[in-house]
Amino acid sequence: MKVINYRKRLIESQIAKKMSYSGGLVIEGAKWVGKSTTASIFSNTVIKLQDPLIKKQYQILATISKDDVLKGEKPILFDEWQEVPEIWDFIRLDIDDNNHKGAYLLTGSTKKQGVKTSHTGTGRINSVYMRPMSLYESGESNGLISLKNLFSHPQLTPVMSDVSIDNIAHYICRGGWPGSLDLSDELQLEVPKDLLESIIKKDVDEVDGVTKDKEKLRKIIKSYARNISTLAANSTIYKDIVNPKTFDTYMSALERLYIVEDVLPWSQNIRSSVRLRKGTKRQFVDPSIAVAALGLSPDRLKKDFETFGFLFESIATRDIRVYAEEIGGSVYYYNDTTGLEIDLIVELKDGSWGGIEVKLGENEVDKASENLKKLANISTVKPAFLMILTNTKMAYQRPDGVYVIPLGCLKP
């Protein structure tokens, strides 16, 4: 299908690849990240099951005729397929009977409890995970430096970023929601607020069927936002708000809605005898959720550089995750009991890795460089690259070999 004002997404290459050998493909991710829009450009038939009338129609058809449910020119997109869970088994059987490739696309914004299928679909129905847009996808990063190329140890030629401190404050508050990009700057800031309200008032109850105390949930999300980009313990986040069991229930709902996406620790290839910290680093899937929870604005953010720094790490984490997935990598953090902490580690499937320290400005670049080199020295596998990711104007390579790269220059 043709989509008006569509901005190309990096995940399209993964979708095309998996459709070439999978009978069906599930695109998962948070609401408003663009799953349906991107899936529709790969589809000839679109069934929007979030429409109550269409949902009711297909619920009835599912009790009568598999052929009528699957009727239409392939590829067929079932948007929010969990609304009629029988569709999964119908698709699996059709793929088995006809050896289809790329015949079905399904999207889902929740990992719903209680969705029953008779078979997992392994080998027939595969999945991809879609995040909010990176700055490269939304057009703010000029993409002059490739994350993939850094693994080949290039000599970096200095290039410039166009992203100012005012720009990055706005991008953090706006988020990577594609539906907001054609709005005015002022209206762009309203989208994350509306998304958060929808999550709190409706989605967290629907995802698991458990009615939640909305004020307590707001306090938990706000506390989580205050601890973004940190290793805060659960007890720090829910202190004086709810009991541990309730906290676990609420957080599980947010995770199934793809809103919370913590960063896992990295521990491979370390020869040091120091103990590694194994907690998770707190992150939302997009920094704008934290901004909405805390009631911040670009102007307020620029007056609180400590919070600005944590949220800059959040948007950097979002973008690095998008870029890493495109090149077959995963993203972690490093922290040990000596106090050595590295904000992000990108590791490829072959075990090669790069260390990234995230700094809003250049005032801590020397210290960041020393930390990166310390990690390199205690690793049994030497890093492919060491990088300080900033919001400064110029990308360059230090005499010690460490790259200093603005987020506004990066692409996969």
Image (tube, rainbow, N blue to C red):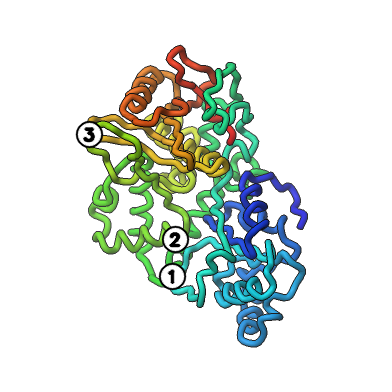
Could you tell whether 100 is left or right of 263 in the image? right
Instruction: Give left or right: position of 23 versus 246.
Output: right
Numbered circle sitting on residue 129: none
Image spot of residue 103 (x, y percent): 69, 65
Residue found at x 38% / y 17%: 366
Foreground: disc 3 or disc 2: 3
Disc nearer the start of the sequence (3/2): 2
Q: Are marks 1 and 2 in contact (CB under 8 Å)?
A: yes
From the image, which quarter does the C terminus lie in? top right
Pointer 1: what residue? 113
Residue 125: quadrant of the picture: bottom right
**Could you tell whether 332 is left or right of 27 in the image?**
left
- The single residue placed furthest to the bottom in the displayed view is 64
* C-alpha gap between disc 3 and disc 1: 40 Å
Mark identifier at residue 274: 3
Mark toward the start of the polypeptide (1 vs 2): 1
Which residue is labeled 2 in the image? Answer: 256
The answer to whether residue 381 is seen in the rendering is yes
Residue mark closest to the camera, 3 vs 1: 3
Q: Which residue is pictured at 67% across the width and 52% down the height?
A: 16
Q: Give the class, few, some or many, for how many residues have Cα within 10 Å of label 3's Cα (few <14, many ≥20).
A: few
Q: CA distance from mark 1 to mark 2?
A: 9 Å
Q: Secondary structure at mark 1?
A: loop
Q: Which three-letter amino acid code belongs to the residue tagged 1?
A: Gln
